Image: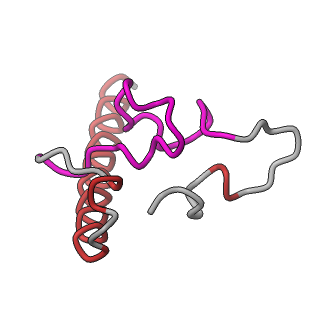
Amino acid sequence: MFSQSLVCIEHWLIPERKAGCGGDCILMDWVPAEFRQPESPCHFIPLNGAGETVKALEADQDRLETAVKNWLRANIERLNQENETDAASAEVIY
């Protein structure tokens, strides 16, 4: 789902970049530490409260797509709220 998608650093051909997942992957912050070494660590991001991952759901495309959509929506909402809080804090400071 994530691997080799447009969000995947491996999708883009970047000269001088060593192949493989690493610190420059924007999804790595969501990968639990114990899963950062395997191939496609992004497939081990917990997508819901049950801890289901891309790896666990890859046999059921419909469930996988629903879980990823819900995960994306929840994280976008959380990031938007954090940005609003940061902006409000910055206004108070200045």
20 over 70 or under it: above or below: above
Toward which corner of the image does residue 63 lie, by quadrant? bottom left
Is residue 13 located in the magenta-colored stretch of the structure? no
> How far across and how far down the image is residue 47, in percent?
25, 51
65 over 8 or under it: above or below: below
Work out whether residue 38 or residue 30 is closer to the camera in this orientation and state it.
38
Q: Quadrant of the N terminus?
A: bottom left
> How far across and how far down the image is residue 71, in percent?
27, 56
Question: In this view, which residue lies farthest toward the left?
Answer: 50
Q: Residue at x 36, y 43 (%)?
A: 44
Question: In this view, which residue lies farthest toward the right?
Answer: 15
Is 77 positioned to the left or the right of 14 in the image? left
Question: In this view, which residue lies farthest toward the front?
Answer: 59
Considering the whole magenta stretch, tell me its main secondary structure. Answer: loop
Q: Quadrant of the C terminus?
A: top left
Work out whether residue 56 or residue 2 is closer to the camera in this orientation and state it.
56
Is residue 27 located in the magenta-colored stretch of the structure? yes
Is 22 positioned to the left or the right of 90 in the image? right
Is 4 positioned to the left or the right of 28 in the image? right
> How far across and how far down the image is residue 55, in percent?
35, 53
Question: In this view, which residue lies farthest toward the bottom?
Answer: 62
Which segment is the magenta one? Answer: 20-49
Q: Residue at x 21, y 50 (%)?
A: 52
Q: Residue at x 27, y 54 (%)?
A: 56
Q: Residue at x 79, y 55 (%)?
A: 13
Work out whether residue 30 or residue 40 is closer to the camera in this orientation and state it.
40
Toward which corner of the image does residue 24 lie, by quadrant? top right
